[in-house]
Amino acid sequence: MILESLSLKNFRNHEDRSFRFPPGSTVVLGGNGAGKTNLLEAVHYLSFGRSFRTADDENLVRLTSDYFYLRGETVSGGIRNRTEASYETAGKKILRYDGRTVSARELVARNRSVVFYTDDMNLVLGASAYRRRYLDQLLSQTDPRYLDDLVRYNRTVKQKNSLLKTMKIKKKIPALPVSGSGIPLRRSCPA
Ligand SMILES: Nc1ncnc2c1ncn2[C@@H]1O[C@H](COP(=O)(O)OP(=O)(O)OP(=O)(O)O)[C@@H](O)[C@H]1O
Ligand SMILES: [Mg+2]
């Protein structure tokens, strides 16, 4: 799938902008704060129905406006498709594929994209949760069953945690032994 064009209305700092991407790779150049990452964020939104920087769509609406609208035209195997996303400050989000209202789940399967963002250095340097989330995102795009399983798994974990909380079961972790320097010694991790 290739993204041919992208239009943004009242998305972050973009009031009304349209871009056409020529065949091949595209490099976006601009000063700090020009809106380059915002552009990537819009592409991500049309792939996942959400931002990779915020969980609150309200943050994406241009400060002086009360809605945003995104439109992307893609081509795959010679077939053109149109994806649209809109959000109103009242909280109503609509995702459309060729004019038909769709779920974020459907967009994930149709519009595949991968964002590599500065925070993604955590993939190498950070906790394993970052790596799991990254792989979950990739696999969800290629296998809808994986996405279904993931949604069910996350729901179950949430229910389990909420049950444990209700039952007031607290797992007591013994304090780490402290070294002579006052720095806690590392607990050895199971492989
Ligand atoms: N909801 C919003 N309404 C208006 N402007 C916004 C909104 N959210 C962010 N901005 C503006 O977007 C700009 C940042 O855009 P972006 O992060 O895309 O910059 P950038 O071109 O990637 O910069 P850098 O080169 O520093 O990474 C800032 O000027 C910020 O004030
Ligand atoms: Mg940036």
Image (cartoon, grey):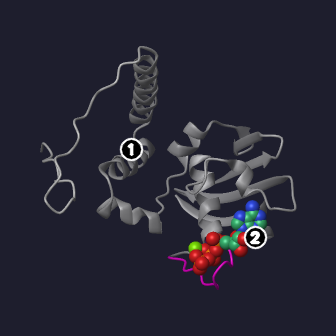
Q: Are marks 2 and 1 in contact (CB under 8 Å)?
A: no
Quadrant (top left/top right/bottom left/bottom right) for the C terminus: top left
Residue 30 is inside the magenta segment = yes
The CB of the residue at mark 2 lies under 8 Å from ligand 1: no
Q: Nearer the viewer, residue 172 or 102?
A: 172
Residue 191 left/right relative to 145:
left
Q: Position of residue 81 (x, y in %)?
A: 65, 52
Residue 28 is inside the magenta segment = yes
Q: Position of residue 85 (x, y in %)?
A: 72, 49
Q: CA distance from mark 2 to mark 1?
A: 32 Å
Q: Quadrant of residue 180?
A: bottom left
| Three-letter amino acid code at the position of disc 2 | Ser
| Residue underneath mark 1 | 136
* Magenta stretch in the rendered image: 25-36
| Three-letter amino acid code at the position of disc 1 | Asp
- Mark in front: 2 vs 1: 1
Q: Position of residue 134 (x, y in %)?
A: 39, 51
On screen, residue 184 above or below 18: above
Q: Is residue 7 visible?
A: no
| Residue underneath mark 2 | 18
